[in-house]
Image (spheres, rainbow, N blue to C red):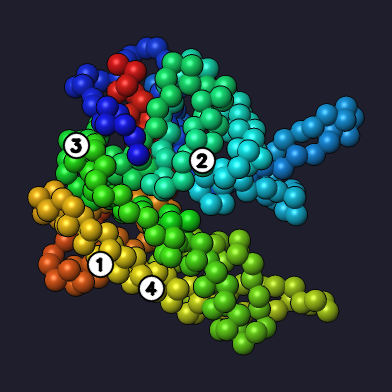
Amino acid sequence: MADSEDASFDEAGAAESGPTPVGVKLGSTRTVLQYVRDDEVETIRTLTCLATYEDALTGEERVLFGEQAAQEYPDEVQYMLRSGLPEDEDRAELASKFFAEVVASEGVDADSAVVYAIPTIDNEPGLANLNSVIEESPVGDALVRSFPESLCGAIPAFGEDLRAIDEVFVAVNMGSTNLEASAYRHGEQLSPFVSGAVTGNEVDRRIANAVEEETQGRVNVDLTTAREYKEEHGDFEEFEPFTDVIQQPGGGAHEFTIERSVMEPLDDYVDDAVDEVANNFLAQLANDHMKPYQLALSKPIVLTGGMACIPGIVDVFEERLSAELDRDVECISADRPDLAPAEGARRIAERLIE
């Protein structure tokens, strides 16, 4: 959680010149970097992974990151933030190398103000490692600060500028490694909640198992393929069955159709997420902070994180949470929930520059 002073902002806009504002979200699956160059907002979204190889001519170590690393070195690529944070020194070193390559590839100025989103998680060593990755990187000479990911992700959902900082609201971060929820009161985080039982990664595992069951054991997909099915075909509004092809071990191809294996796990995910939010997080929030609880439920609940990108999931979550609470609630999200934490962090950086 960020220090309380991190929630204080003046009314002035970002400086017209000076350090480059940079927003960062280092995610377990993908990393998003957003910065301003020549008055234009640039957004970089890449897989959080790297691979190294020896240069055939010089013998020097070369580094690849993101999609290129995953495609060219699938057996050696390393995802160093699988748990959401760099857990030890080795993973922190890999994360530092990865982040340095990302900012170098974009030519981001060292004279920059970097704000990075951090997960709501009780893991001080991991958070310290993440802080070191950013602090010791080639950028952020002007400023480095951290803010909760769900707060950063809520900022674009509320519209322009930093309106979210002035609100009392609830944010639910539907991530790959955790389900997180927090209330915010003028930027102050209240009753942070984390559940590792309801995650995007678990949906991937359920999809892989469901594919095997639906195809009567003829098809086994890995978790990467299951995630791709979820991201490309998951849709609560207009899901359509789709076909794919695999190569048989003895030769030849096998075409198969998926009808249930994506949406049934996603449907279970929403039910589980609603149960955690309604019966664990909101119950605790009401017990700890009754007035902010009442105020927050009269305002839109913001859904952030990669799972919030599934078409229609915001409306389905709203409908089922309203039924569970026996009262009408409204849920919203940014146009691109996967980019929202970096965008919100970049907006904060712009304000802090001033």
Disc 3 is placed on an element classified as: loop
Q: Look at label 1 and name its amino acid.
A: Asn
Residue bearing the label numbered 4: 267
Percent x, y of residue 114: 44, 26
Question: Residue sitting at 34 percent across and 45 percent down?
Answer: 150
Q: Amino acid at mark 3?
A: His
- Spatial distance from mark 4 to mark 2, Cα to Cα? 35 Å
Mark 4: amino acid: Asp
Residue depicted at x 44% and y 60% = 196
Whichever of callouts 1 and 2 sits on the residue coming sooner in the sequence is 2
Residue most toward the top? 18
The reply, left or right, for residue 87 in relation to residue 178 is: right
Nearer to me, 242 or 303: 303
Outermost residue on the bottom side: it is: 216
Q: Residues within 10 Å of mark 3 (few under 14, many from 20)?
A: some
Q: Nearer the viewer, mark 4 or mark 2?
A: 2
**Residue annotated with mark 1:** 279
User: Three-letter amino acid code at disc 2?
Assistant: Pro
Question: Which comes sooner in the sequence, label 4 or label 2?
Answer: 2
Give the number of the mark in front: 4 or 1: 1
The crowd level at tag 1 (other Cα within 10 Å; few <14, some 14-19, many 20+) is few
- CA gap, disc 1 and disc 2: 30 Å
3D distance between C-alphas at marks 4 and 1: 18 Å
Q: Where residue 25 sits: x, y (%)?
A: 46, 39
Estimate how packed mark 4 is, as few (under 14), some (14 to 19) or many (20 or more) residues with alpha carbons within 10 Å: some
Residue at x 31%, y 31% (from the top left corner): 3
Instruction: Write down the quadrant of residue 341 in the picture.
Output: top left
| Residue tagged 2 | 125
Disc 3 designates what residue? 186
- Does residue 142 show up? yes
